[in-house]
Amino acid sequence: MSESSVVVITGANRGIGLELARHYAREGHEVIGVCRQSSEELANVTAQVIEEVDVTTNEGIEKLKAGLAGKSISLLINNAGLLQDEQLGSIDFDSIRIQMEINAYAPLRVAEALIPLMGQSSKIANITSRMGSIADNDSGGRYGYRASKAALNAFGKSLAMDLKPKGIAVAQLHPGYVKTRMVGFGGLISPEDSARGLAERITKLSLENTGSFWHSNGEELPW
């Protein structure tokens, strides 16, 4: 991306999203943070914050489109996500539904809405999880999270195929086990390290490797 490219990040108010916002702001890009509730930290690093956006609703998507009217987006990072737990024998199907809405359907909603603002050499990075890998599942559980991230991976792969003729590359990126509120700050790497790795994967994303599923450390992950 060239300097002052427009970078749009959903779920940007904390954790990995906030660190990605800081990273791209330091590189001189115009960062637009999208979130339900802004934070002072986000406001201090972004060129624009579009808040009170619920990306699971038509109203939220319309508000996002209005806030980005006239922009030419170089990079869209679908980062907003939700992790909940379900155990066999007491599965909460409402929990699974909500995770599907936030983790899978919302990134597809956002991408479809913003594609008209993207052009040749634009990129979409879907922040997924290796827990969405069916081949890598050797511990079970987490029914909603695993299924929603697997669905996101499938959506991302289809987006990559559909958008390749338009010159838009798409990647599914696992951030690593990151010390964020989502996991009770019990991860293995810092948000800063994760953001650096994710940004490197995004830099290396091209039409030649579009549709791939990568760990932030550069490892290609199994579906």
Image (cartoon, rainbow, N blue to C red):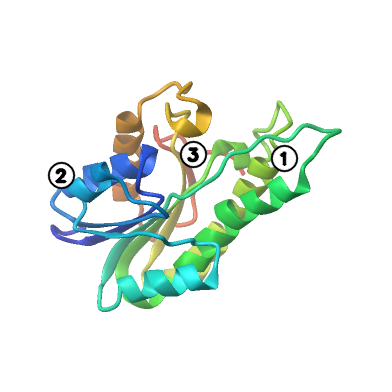
Q: Which residue is mark 3?
A: 220
The location of residue 159, given as percent across then percent down, is: 51, 65
Dot 3 amino acid type: Glu
For badge 2, the amino acid type reads Arg
Amino acid, disc 1: Tyr
Query: Residue 150: x percent and y percent?
Result: 63, 48
User: Does label 2 or label 1 sit earlier along the sequence?
Assistant: 2
Answer left or right for 94 relative to 128. right
Above or below 58: residue 52? above
Q: Which sits in the foreground, 55 or 158?
A: 55
At 15% from the left and 44% from the top, the residue drawn is: 26
Q: Quadrant of residue 56?
A: bottom right
- Image quarter where the C terminus lies is top right
Among the 4 quarters of the image, the one containing residue 185 = top left
- Name, please, the residue furthest toward the right: 89
Per the image, the residue denoted by label 1 is 143
Residue at the image point whose x is 49% and y is 39% from the top: 220
Q: Residues within 10 Å of mark 3 (few under 14, many from 20)?
A: few
Q: Residue at x 45, y 34 (%)?
A: 219
Label of residue 26 in the image: 2
Q: Dot 1, crowdedness within 10 Å: few (<14), some or many (≥20)? A: many
Residue 186 in percent (x, y) is at 48, 21
- Tell me whether the residue at label 2 lies in contact with that at label 1, contact meaning CB atoms closer than 8 angstroms: no
